[in-house]
Image (spheres, rainbow, N blue to C red):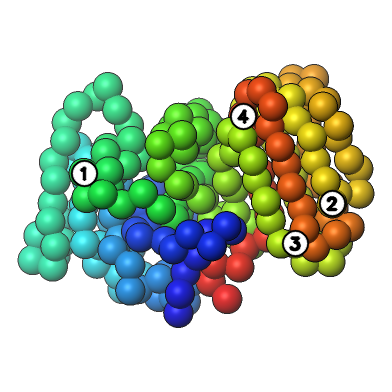
């Protein structure tokens, strides 16, 4: 199976965070890609029958037997630097491996502040890497300029400013024309496609755009 982002760019790696993971069948559908586990995420992968190729973090929440299994199968990179969370450490390792097109799993970190921190890291590094977060049946894509997408009929498309975006859309039921979205005042959740060709042009700021997932079909 060829795994692609919404714009046709091939995925190169999967970063797995210590949050809610998809079903084992979804994990297996990406088995041809290298898996990078951020610290305790390796436990859940191991329990699902997947041994990551790389384990990265301060290793404070991963079980010793999992560390041993990864060290045999792949590589363990201990990084105690508290200036970066485990997601960012995994991204730095991916960048060192020259992986730019990355699927992120487990973005929900359990506690709300952990999840928000992960979203912040996603937006920060999305400027230099092509990142897409898979959660349930939806994917989130950081967008800073132009987003073009071939939508399904009446597909739900959400635009969440990060934290501010001035933008123009086409192909949506509720269009925006050089309008401003701002966290705390106005978001663009649950819009719907009325055309196959959907575009969002960001004139200023940035946004997370959510569409239906086709990555594991």
Circle 2 sits on which residue?
171
Circles 1 and 3: CB atoms closer than 8 Å: no
* Depth check, front residue: 193 or 41: 193
Whether residue 11 is visible: yes
Upstream in the sequence, badge 2 or badge 3? 3
Report the disc number at residue 96.
1
| Rendering coords of residue 149 (x, y %) | 69, 56
Q: In this rendering, would 19 be left or right of 136?
A: left
Whether residue 40 is visible: no
Circle 4 sits on which residue?
206
SS at mark 1 in the image: helix
Upstream in the sequence, badge 2 or badge 1? 1
Report the disc number at residue 173.
none
Distance from the alpha carbon under mark 3 to that under mark 4: 21 Å
SS at mark 4 in the image: strand
Circles 2 and 3: CB atoms closer than 8 Å: yes
Tell me the quarter of the picture where residue 73 sits: bottom left
| Rendering coords of residue 160 (x, y %) | 69, 35
Q: How many C-alpha atoms fall within 10 Å of the one at disc 3: few (<14), some, or many (≥20)? A: many
SS at mark 3 in the image: loop
Circle 3 sits on which residue?
151
| Rendering coords of residue 216 (x, y %) | 53, 71
| Rendering coords of residue 182 (x, y %) | 73, 22
Distance from the alpha carbon under mark 2 to that under mark 1: 38 Å
């Amino acid at each position: 199976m060829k795994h692609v982002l919404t714009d046709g760019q091939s995925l190169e790696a999967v970063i797995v965070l210590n949050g809610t993971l998809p079903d084992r069948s979804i994990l297996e559908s990406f088995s041809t890609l290298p898996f990078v586990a951020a610290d305790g995420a390796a436990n859940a992968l191991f329990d699902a029958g997947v041994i990551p190729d790389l384990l990265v973090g301060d290793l404070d929440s991963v079980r010793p037997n999992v560390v041993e299994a990864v060290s045999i199968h792949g590589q363990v990179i201990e990084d105690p630097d508290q200036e970066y969370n485990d997601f960012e450490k995994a991204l730095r390792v991916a960048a060192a491996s020259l992986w730019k097109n990355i699927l992120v799993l487990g973005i929900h970190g359990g506690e709300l502040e952990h999840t928000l921190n992960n979203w912040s890291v996603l937006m920060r590094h999305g400027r230099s890497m092509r990142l897409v977060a898979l959660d349930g049946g939806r994917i989130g894509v950081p967008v800073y300029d132009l987003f073009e997408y071939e939508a399904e009929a009446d597909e739900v498309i959400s635009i969440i400013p990060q934290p501010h975006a001035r933008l123009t859309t086409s192909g949506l039921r509720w269009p925006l024309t050089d309008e401003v979205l701002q966290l705390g005042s106005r978001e663009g959740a649950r819009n719907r496609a009325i055309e196959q060709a959907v575009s969002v042009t960001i004139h200023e700021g940035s946004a997370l755009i959510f569409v239906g997932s086709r990555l594991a079909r």
